[in-house]
Image (cartoon, rainbow, N blue to C red):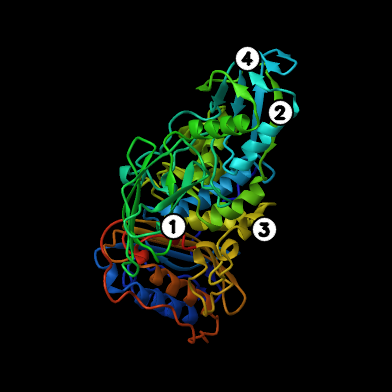
Amino acid sequence: MGSRTRNVIATLSAGGLVAAFNVVPSALPMAESQNEMDPAVKELAADIDEILEDPRMDGSQASVVVADATSGDVLYERGGDDRLMPASNQKILTSAAAMDILGPDHTFSTTVETDARHTGRILAGDLYLRGTGDPTLLVEDYEVLADEIVAAGIQRVHGGVVADDTWFDDVRLGLNWTWDSEQYYYGAQISALTVSPDVDYDSGTVIVEVDPGRRAGDPPRVTVIPENDYVEIVNDAQTTAAGTGQAIGINRLPGSNTIRITGTIATDGAQARTWRSVWEPTDFAAGLFLQALEERGVQVREGISRGATPDGARVLAERESMPLSELLIPFMKLSNNGHAEILIKSMGQAVADAGTWSAGNEALRSSLRDWGVEPATMAIADGSGLSRRNLVPPNEIITLLRSLQDEPWYDTWYESMPVAGIEERLVGGTLRFRMAGTAAEGNARGKTGTLTAATGLSGYVTTADGDELVYSILINNHVSAKPSDLEDRIVVRLAEHSADGSAVTTSQVPPAPAEQPENGLHGELGDVECSWVKTC
């Protein structure tokens, strides 16, 4: 792949300077810079400056860059070279590199193999369940694999089920992932052999549902999806009288697969439902496969163990995933952290025969260089942006967004970006309830991102003149509620931009919260990404 370097810099034209440098709103002399600026661009820059003067930005850091998607001319820049935590904006880098390295047609295979003698209905050895990272495997898929073993005439296995997750290393959690995120589905452990509870494909997790008991004083009814005996439910909750509401806690104890249910739920209370990660997803997946075999009458003598599939083993059953081009939709629309990390390790395996974060990150860096992005200007710790050690300058995101337009798979990748104001979940994604009723609705595409004290939005938007812009907005170190409404106001203003200065002024963006929500990662909804709490 040839270099496609596009330096995002201001350019001079016959009409004068067409880009605004607003590292600090008044940093450049008015007479020599802003007065020579195109009037419409000057007005745009002033409006963005005003948005960023919000009191919530006091003591925080905002880096914003806006450029023409075709020419690269910069319309606005504030701190474009500053390295900030991108949160899930990191997935822009990961998804693009995965399309480049693995390709849109890449699939993940899961096989059942053996090197043992098969005589009649007896297999005189082990079944090797071998994974390559497929995050889309459901319990039904393990049941189909078990059906294929039965179809092969095997009813007794004199060995056991050997779980082979060696396609990736055994490091389950990313660098600097916080201990208090470990039980949540967005911080699930990464394995080459895993299972998801539903078609959001949150691999390595279970869904826990809590419904009221029949009478006050009864324990609530607890359902785990998929049904299994790998996790243990300790139900310390109680059903209370009608009208007393619901206050249920569902927490997995650290380092275990014990999920404790606490609190109360009224007899007329709504179901409590949440996702919880499992400890060691490899064993969870192997247990579901063994369970499926036993339900079909296949006797397995030695249970579950771990190991590598021997060379020369023959394939008895196989399942192939959807292609990466399709996986991009739940990955990017719903900001799935597990998909990002699986893709990072898959890239490492493809390039260096090593399914590790370090090998995958180096592969990602190589792709970035080909697109004119300079990885030396950033810190890359993981693929999802969950790590607080990721640091990326918005100018590099702008260069990447522009360069990707030349790729043959760009249209597919572009379609995976969330779309502002479109409520259909796998179209609007994490932007489905943002910027509705504005010039950005159905227009702006962007990757959202949220960590405690970090938020971001980067992507594409079309102006009132029909010109496409690329933008990157990163905000760090705020102690208020997540100021995503400021990101929205900027993007809406870009959608309204016109070269003749006739900006549309009818769009209304939801105002800032009247009160600061409770502090804490899992506090009020306005403080977290909607994908974290399954509201988008």
Numbered label attached to residue 411: 3
Q: Residues within 10 Å of mark 3 (few under 14, many from 20)?
A: few
Q: Residues within 10 Å of mark 1 (few under 14, many from 20)?
A: many
Per the image, label 2 sits on a secondary structure element best described as helix
Per the image, label 1 sits on a secondary structure element best described as helix
- Callout 4 touching callout 2 (CB < 8 Å): no
The mark that comes first in sequence, 1 or 4, is: 4
Of badges 1 and 2, the one in the foreground is: 2
Counting from the top left corner in percent of width and height, residue 175 is at 38, 38
Q: Quadrant of residue 467?
A: bottom right
Of badges 1 and 4, the one in the foreground is: 4
The mark that comes first in sequence, 3 or 1, is: 1
The mark that comes first in sequence, 1 or 2, is: 2
Q: Amino acid at mark 1?
A: Pro
Of badges 3 and 1, the one in the foreground is: 3
The N terminus sits in image quarter: top right
User: Which residue position is annotated with label 2?
Assistant: 150
Real-space CA distance between mark 3 and mark 4, rounded to the nearest whole angstrom: 48 Å
Left or right side of 129 for 378: left
Q: Amino acid at mark 2?
A: Val
Q: Residues within 10 Å of mark 2 (few under 14, many from 20)?
A: some
The mark that comes first in sequence, 3 or 2, is: 2
Residue 123, above or below 339: above
| Residue nearest the observer in this picture, 363 or 78 | 363
User: Which residue position is annotated with label 1?
Assistant: 394
What's the residue at 64%, 26% (across, down)?
Answer: 298
Q: Amino acid at mark 3?
A: Asp
Counting from the top left corner in percent of width and height, residue 143 is at 64, 37
Counting from the top left corner in percent of width and height, residue 235 is at 35, 46
User: Which residue position is annotated with label 4?
Assistant: 125
